[in-house]
Image (cartoon, rainbow, N blue to C red):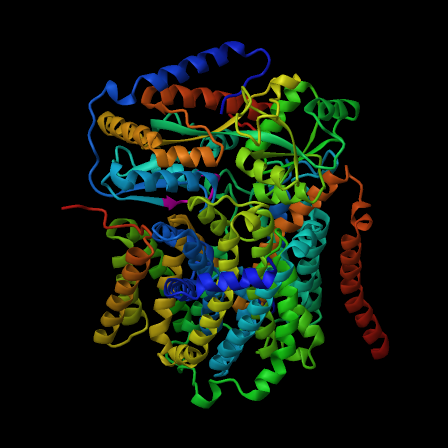
């Protein structure tokens, strides 16, 4: 559990390195003003400094944070939800975004959250129709349409 | 935009020639024309309220008032220095229902990012609005003419400050041109937007600021700014500007025109492109459009199809040269 | 003509069937659009702009302005009910508002937010009507050095937005790092873009906020799908009690004043206003420990500030033609499209339009109060829908809203990535508001420091020579020194 608690600080150290190294080629000072590398350098330093302080605090047993991880089923549900969102993004350009919304909600309610079939499908259709009415018909936002014509 | 440095007289001559050509020969004369079917989207890379957005919404409104039956929708695909907009249109090869708004970022973003030119790929349709810039200074400041402004910068290089929009934008390039033409060094202070730069100028923090003529007139009339020079070929005739000399008259040979136009996706059917060029030309001939141009103190020289293509390519070369000179160009 | 006469003339324009009808329509649309994730008031105004083309310019501008401040009221709904701030100015509302909703007091939070927004809005409109020229001159005295110090104050203050300052600051630094991505605003040099053209203009606020708050929140809740009971809302908890009003009226007043002053500065905006108002309120509060756990006065201050700021942004727009916010920029565009030229002469040349607009803001705010007060309990009752049914809908709407903001699928992917980050931040107990606020403040912080030094040719004395800047510098130094001194005193007392 100690190692897990240290992850945010380790992540921050990694990110600070990335920011520092990623902006190495840029100028630190540019004529009379700070250059494009000025802020990244100081931010990387601040990030690393804060991370080290957090690590020291944690080593002494303080500020471990209120870690709260779900059980396996919970993890699976989060993973499935993420996969469903990615899926919605992938099928939007093909089937159109409005059908993708319906499929996403239908999938989530029936398979991931195990709700009853009829109310789930009704919700899916209802939200999709709402999106169509508000975003497409009313606001005139051009959401990705169905890609095939007959 | 038409830009010249002292040595580039020949270019100006060809420009002037193509202006007259474009104005006399209707773009529609050479090719057959065919209307697209269904609603048409005009893609704009700026947010709502930016100049390209306002221009396209205005002309779309005029065209839908009897000239064009297809409903025209203006969509803002913002972000990436217009690259979201042009990449969208570049991906729609041959699509007859989408048009791209051409504004300077469509030219400069690929040069700055080192990506392939957009204007070499799309189907040019028309260039139809241009806008001049006026250099302003504080009403109670020490400068009364551009000569005094230049002299001050010569005496103390870098001590004369200009507040303008984003790095690599029109104000920045105009500043670079003035620096080159007068052989001086100015301090250019970029801002996140033109209006932020205007706030810096109105607060009396800097000596100079470029504005479009309409913005400038409002500031001059209310006594919040004093005009130094118009960066155009000849003086404007409107009462507010007829006494404002051009930069050329004051020995700084700079002409800078912002311009906007429209293009179709790559591989657009020439007949559809010709139809659009014809419609845009007709729209610019309406009284409604002329009134708006007069009100905004803009110009509306029309370039259609091939003329537009040649015009845009020339401007692209100018952008590349200027961006290289300010150290921003990647290709 | 005196101001009162002009204002009377303005009311004559508004108090017609057409005037009232379109102002009502405007605020209603604003209320709805503001509640959609991704589509804030500015985008909503832009999308509905073409609908106003047939109208009289004065009526069109009144309606569009209605969308603008109506959107501030509407944004409160999503912030409080589902912890998804539709735009940056709603972040501080979400912090305590959603905690209150969780405790079954969503109705109270929404009602107090509406009352606070109304009072601050009306106060700001009075300022617009009577002291616009004075305030616009004041706004112009604010420039790069002052913006830098203001942003610095905001960034350092994020340290206090969490139980542990180190964790909060880490989140703030993360936000500042995210803001680095993209072309450097001054030199145009690409930073951390890894040659991806999509990253060139940087990472937009909208997908980050939707991801970190909305999606992160839903993911964390879905871990225990079966266990989530609908939030219990009892009817008598839905309406604010007299004691709630007494507890928040000072917060509304202070928040409104801060909001107005921050709002009139073209470079700051409603998000900075609500952050500063929230932090000020915690200083004044008799129970600062409640902030972050569901403090009604925190919600009141933040909401009063962002509505006052959104009205205050009208001042530089009307007096100078300089938009103070994204929404006023669209309003300016609408003026141009309707053939009215904005600029310093607007108030003289178009006095009917300007005074009609000002009068319409009194009326519009009243409409919004009337819409929101009775509906607050109704909206709060939305939480009675079982969460399992709400969750997929929130996710789908978030993604559609993110897409609609840019019409680019890249924004959707960005949203999902930040959703995962938001979820991890919840799991690892890193507070999320500092990240989002730092992201908003970062460009202001960096740009204005560099602009300041360009203005002063490299001399740091610019920060002490300008009077407002000198005062702000003192405030920044004090805000840094006081907690450190306090900590030293405590540790000495402890040892």
Q: Which residues are magenta?
A: B75-82
Residue A48 appears in view: no
Location of residue A56 in the rendering, given as x and y in whole percent from the top left corner: 71, 65
B260 on left or right of A137: right
Determine the image quadrant of residue A26.
top right
Magenta-span inclusion, residue B165: no
User: Which residue is outermost to the front?
Assistant: C1
Does residue C366 lie above or below C441 as drawn? Answer: below
Location of residue C226 in the rendering, given as x and y in whole percent from the top left corner: 37, 79
Determine the image quadrant of residue A13.
bottom right
Location of residue C448 in the rendering, given as x and y in whole percent from the top left corner: 67, 46
Magenta-span inclusion, residue B76: yes
B103 on left or right of C467: left
Residue situated in front as seen by the camera: B184 or C257? C257
Does residue C342 lie above or below C284 as drawn? Answer: above
**Quadrant in the picture for the N terminus of chain A:** bottom right
Determine the image quadrant of residue B266.
top left
Q: From the image, give the main secondary structure of the stretch colored magenta.
A: loop
């Amino acid at each position: 559990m100690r190692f897990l608690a240290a992850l945010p600080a380790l992540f921050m150290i990694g990110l600070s390195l990335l920011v520092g190294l990623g902006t190495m080629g840029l100028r630190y000072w540019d004529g009379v003003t700070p250059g494009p590398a000025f802020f990244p350098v100081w931010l990387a330093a601040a990030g690393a400094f804060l991370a080290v302080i957090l690590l020291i605090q944690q080593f002494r047993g303080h500020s471990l944070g209120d870690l709260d991880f779900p059980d396996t089923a919970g993890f699976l549900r989060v993973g499935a939800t993420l996969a469903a969102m990615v899926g919605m993004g992938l099928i939007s350009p093909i089937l159109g975004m409005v059908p993708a919304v319906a499929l996403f909600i239908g999938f989530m309610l029936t398979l991931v959250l195990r709700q009853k079939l009829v109310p789930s499908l009704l919700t899916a259709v209802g939200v999709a129709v709402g999106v169509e009415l508000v975003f497409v018909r009313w606001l005139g936002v051009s959401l990705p349409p169905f890609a095939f014509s007959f | 935009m038409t830009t010249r440095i002292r040595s580039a007289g020949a270019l100006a001559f060809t420009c002037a020639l193509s202006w007259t050509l474009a104005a006399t020969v209707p773009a529609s004369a050479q090719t057959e024309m065919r209307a697209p079917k269904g609603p048409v989207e005009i893609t704009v890379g700026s947010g709502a309220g930016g100049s390209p957005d306002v221009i396209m919404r205005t002309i779309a409104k005029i065209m839908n008032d009897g000239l064009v039956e297809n409903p025209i929708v203006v969509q803002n695909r913002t972000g990436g220095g217009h690259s979201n907009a042009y990449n969208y249109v570049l991906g729609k090869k041959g699509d007859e229902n989408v048009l791209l708004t051409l504004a300077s970022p469509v030219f400069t973003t690929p040069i700055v990012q080192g990506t392939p030119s957009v204007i070499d790929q799309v189907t040019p349709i028309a260039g139809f609005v241009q806008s001049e810039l006026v250099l302003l200074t504080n009403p109670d400041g020490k400068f009364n003419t551009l000569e005094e402004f230049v002299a001050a910068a010569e005496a103390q290089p870098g001590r004369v400050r200009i507040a303008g929009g984003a790095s690599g934008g029109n104000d920045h390039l105009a500043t670079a041109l003035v620096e080159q033409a007068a052989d001086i060094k100015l301090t250019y202070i970029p801002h996140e937007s033109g209006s932020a730069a205007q706030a810096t100028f109105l607060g009396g923090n800097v000596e100079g600021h470029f504005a479009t003529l309409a913005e400038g007139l409002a500031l001059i009339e209310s006594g919040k700014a004093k005009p130094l020079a118009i960066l155009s070929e000849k003086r404007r005739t409107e009462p507010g500007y007829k006494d404002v000399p051009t930069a050329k008259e004051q020995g700084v040979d700079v002409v800078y025109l912002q311009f906007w136009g429209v293009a179709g996706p790559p591989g657009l059917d020439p007949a559809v492109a010709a139809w659009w060029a014809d419609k845009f030309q007709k729209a610019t001939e309406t009284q409604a459009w002329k009134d708006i141009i007069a009100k905004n103190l803009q110009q509306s020289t029309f370039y259609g199809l091939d003329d537009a293509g040649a015009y845009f390519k020339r401007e692209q070369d100018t952008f590349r040269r200027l961006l290289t000179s300010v150290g921003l160009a990647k290709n | 003509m005196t101001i009162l006469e002009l204002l009377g003339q303005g009311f004559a324009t508004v108090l017609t069937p057409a005037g009232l009808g379109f102002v009502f329509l405007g605020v209603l649309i604003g209320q709805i659009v503001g509640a959609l994730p991704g589509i804030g008031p500015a985008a909503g105004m832009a999308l509905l702009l073409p609908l106003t083309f047939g109208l009289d310019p004065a009526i069109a501008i009144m309606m569009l302005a209605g969308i603008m401040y109506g959107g501030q009221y509407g944004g409160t709904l999503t912030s409080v009910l589902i912890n998804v701030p539709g735009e940056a100015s709603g972040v501080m509302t979400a912090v305590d508002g959603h905690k209150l909703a969780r405790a079954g007091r969503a109705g109270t939070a929404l009602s107090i937010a509406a009352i606070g927004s109304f009072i601050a809005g009306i106060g700001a409109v009075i300022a617009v009507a009577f002291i616009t020229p004075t305030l616009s001159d004041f706004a112009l005295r604010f420039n790069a050095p002052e913006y830098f110090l203001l942003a610095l104050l905001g960034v350092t203050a994020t340290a206090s937005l969490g139980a542990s300052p180190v964790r909060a600051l880490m989140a703030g630094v993360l936000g500042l790092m995210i803001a680095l991505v993209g072309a450097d605003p001054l030199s145009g040099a690409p930073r951390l873009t890894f040659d991806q053209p999509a990253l060139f203009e940087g990472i937009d606020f909208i997908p980050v906020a939707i991801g970190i708050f909305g999606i992160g929140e839903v993911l964390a809740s879905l871990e225990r799908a079966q266990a989530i009971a609908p939030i219990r809302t009892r009817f008598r908890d839905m309406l604010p009690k007299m004691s709630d009003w007494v507890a928040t009226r000072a917060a509304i007043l202070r928040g409104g004043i801060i909001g107005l002053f921050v709002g009139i500065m073209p470079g700051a905006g409603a998000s900075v206003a609500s952050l500063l108002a929230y932090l000020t309120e915690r200083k004044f509060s008799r129970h600062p420990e409640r902030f972050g756990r569901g403090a009604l006065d925190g919600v009141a201050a933040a909401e009063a500030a962002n509505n006052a700021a959104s009205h205050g942004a009208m001042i530089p727009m009307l007096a100078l033609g300089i938009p103070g916010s994204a929404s006023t920029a669209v309003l300016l565009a609408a003026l141009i499209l309707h053939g009215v030229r904005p600029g310093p002469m607007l108030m003289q040349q178009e006095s009917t339009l300007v005074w009609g607009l000002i009068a319409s803001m009194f009326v519009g705010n009243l409409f919004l109060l009337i819409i929101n007060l009775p509906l607050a309990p109704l909206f709060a009752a939305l939480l009675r829908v079982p969460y399992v049914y709400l969750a997929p809908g929130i996710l789908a709407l978030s993604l559609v809203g993110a897409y609609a903001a840019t019409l680019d699928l890249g924004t959707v992917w960005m949203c999902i990535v930040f959703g995962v980050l938001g979820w991890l931040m919840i799991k690892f107990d890193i507070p999320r508001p500092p990240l989002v606020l730092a992201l908003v403040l970062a460009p202001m912080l960096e740009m204005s420091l560099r602009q300041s030094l360009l203005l002063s040719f490299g001399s740091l004395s610019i920060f002490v020579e300008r009077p407002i800047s000198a005062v702000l510098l003192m405030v920044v130094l004090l805000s840094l020194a006081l907690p450190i001194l306090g900590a030293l005193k405590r540790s000495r007392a402890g040892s």
